[in-house]
Image: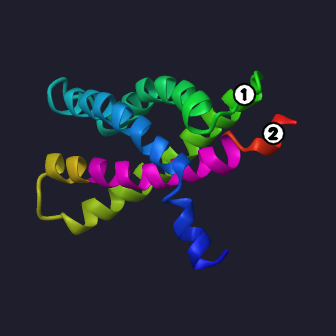
């Protein structure tokens, strides 16, 4: 893949729609995640998973019909979506937590976890976009 096509991948209409959907999901999910962790004192994994559980329900329908205009009505796209979300979640937060705990080892666990949640969100967005575009809502599955 050329550099130009890589750049176009993140600047086309689908990516812009994905970002708009993501803003809505991020506001809702991030609020849930940080309230669960900082107010209800639920652990890191429950707090971050709650973010993606609630946000993913909305994300599936908005991305399917609005972002990727995937019209096939079948259960396989929901299965692919679930696989994608779980894979991206485990990778993003599984990578972010040890990195931030190492880099911020002199900080409190609360600071380490909050910063790792922010890094995890960033990693997740990139992985999730690629997964939804090329796996979940790929037009080759419409035939």
Res 2 quadrant in image: bottom right
| Earlier-in-chain disc, 2 versus 1 | 1
State the SS at label 1: loop
Q: Residue tagged by mark 2?
A: 141
Q: Say above or below: 78 vs 88.
A: above
Q: Toward the viewer: 17 or 95?
A: 17
Residue at 42 percent of width and 58 percent of height: 95
Residue at 88 percent of width and 36 percent of height: 143
Q: Is residue 130 magenta?
A: yes
Q: Which mark is residue 71?
A: 1
Q: Relative to residue 11, is residue 83 drawn left or right?
A: right
Q: Is residue 16 magenta?
A: no
Where is residue 56? Give x, y as percent. 49, 29
Q: Toward the viewer: 104 or 8?
A: 8
Q: Relative to residue 65, is residue 75 drawn left or right?
A: right
State the SS at label 2: helix
Where is residue 38? Give x, y as percent. 16, 32
Numbered disc in front, either 2 or 1: 1
Say few, some or many: other residues with alpha carbon within 10 Å of mark 2 (under 14 / 14 to 19 / 20 or more): few
Residue at 61 percent of width and 42 percent of height: 84
Residue at far right of view? 143
State the extent of the magenta-drawn residues as a range.
116-136
Task: Report the magenta stretch's main SS.
Answer: helix
Q: Relative to residue 19, is residue 101 drawn left or right?
A: left
């Amino acid at each position: 893949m050329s550099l130009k096509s890589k750049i176009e991948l993140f600047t086309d209409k689908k990516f812009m729609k994905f970002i708009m959907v993501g803003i809505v999901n991020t506001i809702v999910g991030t609020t849930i995640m940080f309230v669960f962790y900082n107010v209800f004192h639920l652990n890191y994994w429950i707090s971050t998973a709650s973010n993606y559980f609630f946000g993913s329900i909305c994300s599936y329908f908005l991305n399917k019909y609005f972002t990727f205009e995937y019209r096939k009505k079948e259960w396989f796209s929901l299965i692919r979506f679930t696989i994608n979300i779980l894979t991206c979640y485990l990778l993003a937060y599984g990578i972010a937590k040890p990195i931030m705990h190492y880099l911020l080892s002199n900080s409190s666990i609360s600071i380490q976890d909050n910063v790792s949640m922010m890094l995890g969100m960033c990693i997740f967005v990139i992985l999730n976009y690629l997964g939804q575009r090329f796996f979940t809502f790929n037009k080759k599955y419409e035939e």
